[in-house]
Image (tube, rainbow, N blue to C red):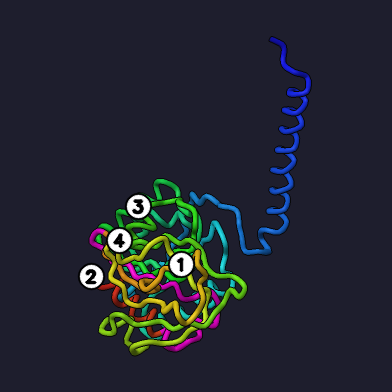
């Protein structure tokens, strides 16, 4: 039975329209995406050269800032500056890179802590993921801030569910994007929470997660009081909205704080003290 000329024409027109939409969308992304903070993934295969002086320090930190998604330009720069200051004060060694090829067994073995500086997207090859996993399982420490959990797409379940201990990001309020809210300290006895007392107010881009990190077995340090800002019905987590927590993946330690979209956060003294304590804790051998 011969095809209807009308149906054939409609199919051709539909295909042309689909191609046109994809092309227009790609062109829009190519022109506007970088301005909005989005970057294309880059596969790193050649490891960086590590300084010979790295091993002279008692705490060695890999400051990793690669993004294959939204890029928090100001936050990344401010976090790096804050960490460099903390390192100078404590005698730590920091090696900063956006080259994911550093995630190999030999080079990772030279570090005590990986600082995930607003990293987003699918940053690692399968081999690099395997090396990262082994390093954590063998007792490595991870400290992640804000965008380190800010990837909506499911690139790597181990990263979100095991390393971050339940950090499956779903979104944040807009209009306004930044809001003042009260953070309730749940474990005031943990050294990372010592700078804040029982609660504190802070202005940030407040992340919402699929479910409480508590359900994944993480130890919650602080939660958001949703009554002090309006997350909206779709982004509400109710009475259990963790915003800072720790996890114990394998034999390692992981600290995550959703604070830190803008540069101002890293200028806050209490925040710097929290990161200082988090690195000290992550470099140790006790979890939680």
The residue closer to the viewer here, 154 or 96, is 154
User: What secondary structure is found at the residue carrying circle 2?
Assistant: loop
Measured along the vertical axis of the image, is residue 18 above or below residue 147? above
For label 2, the residue is 287
Q: Could you tell me which quadrant the C terminus lies in?
A: bottom left
Q: How many marks?
A: 4
Q: Position of residue 175 (x, y in %)?
A: 62, 73
Q: Earlier in the sequence, mark 4 or mark 1?
A: 1
Q: Are marks 2 and 1 in contact (CB under 8 Å)?
A: no
How far apart, in angstroms, are the residues tagged by discs 4 and 1? 15 Å
Query: Residue drawn 58% across and 73% down?
Result: 177
Q: Is residue 278 visible?
A: yes
Q: Are marks 4 and 1 in contact (CB under 8 Å)?
A: no
Q: Residues within 10 Å of mark 3 (few under 14, many from 20)?
A: many
Residue span colored magenta: 250-272
For label 3, the residue is 131
User: What secondary structure is found at the residue carrying circle 4?
Assistant: helix
Measured along the vertical axis of the image, is residue 188 above or below residue 127? below
User: What secondary structure is found at the residue carrying circle 1?
Assistant: strand
The residue closer to the viewer here, 1 or 143, is 1
For label 1, the residue is 208
For label 4, the residue is 216
Asked if residue 252 is among those painted magenta in the image, a careful observer would answer: yes
Q: Residues within 10 Å of mark 4 (few under 14, many from 20)?
A: some
Query: Residue drawn 41% across and 79% down?
Result: 225
Residue sitting farthest toward the front: 233
Asked if residue 284 is among those painted magenta in the image, a careful observer would answer: no
């Amino acid at each position: 039975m011969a095809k209807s000329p009308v149906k054939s024409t409609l199919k051709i027109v539909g295909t042309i329209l689909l191609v046109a939409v994809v092309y227009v969308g790609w062109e829009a992304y190519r022109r506007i995406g970088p301005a909005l903070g989005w970057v294309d993934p880059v596969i790193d295969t050649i490891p960086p050269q590590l300084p010979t002086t790295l091993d002279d320090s008692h705490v060695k930190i890999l400051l990793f800032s690669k993004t294959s998604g939204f890029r928090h330009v100001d936050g990344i720069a401010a976090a790096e500056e804050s960490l460099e200051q903390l390192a100078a004060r404590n005698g730590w060694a920091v090696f900063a890179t956006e080259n994911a090829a550093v995630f190999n067994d030999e080079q990772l073995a030279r570090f005590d802590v990986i600082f995930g500086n607003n990293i987003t997207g699918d940053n690692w090859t399968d081999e690099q993921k395997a090396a990262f996993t082994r390093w954590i399982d063998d007792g490595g420490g991870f400290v992640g801030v804000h965008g380190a959990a800010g990837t909506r797409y499911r690139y790597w379940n181990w990263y979100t569910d095991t390393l971050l201990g339940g950090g499956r990001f779903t979104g944040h309020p807009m209009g306004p994007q930044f809001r003042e809210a009260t953070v309730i300290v749940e474990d005031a006895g943990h050294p990372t929470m010592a700078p804040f007392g029982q609660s504190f107010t802070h202005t940030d881009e407040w992340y919402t997660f699929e479910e409480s990190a508590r359900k994944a077995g993480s130890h919650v340090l602080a939660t958001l009081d949703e009554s002090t800002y309006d997350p909206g019905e779709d982004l509400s987590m109710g009475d259990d909205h963790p915003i800072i927590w720790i996890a114990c993946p394998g034999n390692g330690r992981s600290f995550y704080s959703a604070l830190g979209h803008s540069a101002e956060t890293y200028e806050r003294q209490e925040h710097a003290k929290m990161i200082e304590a988090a690195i000290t804790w992550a470099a140790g051998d006790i979890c939680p």
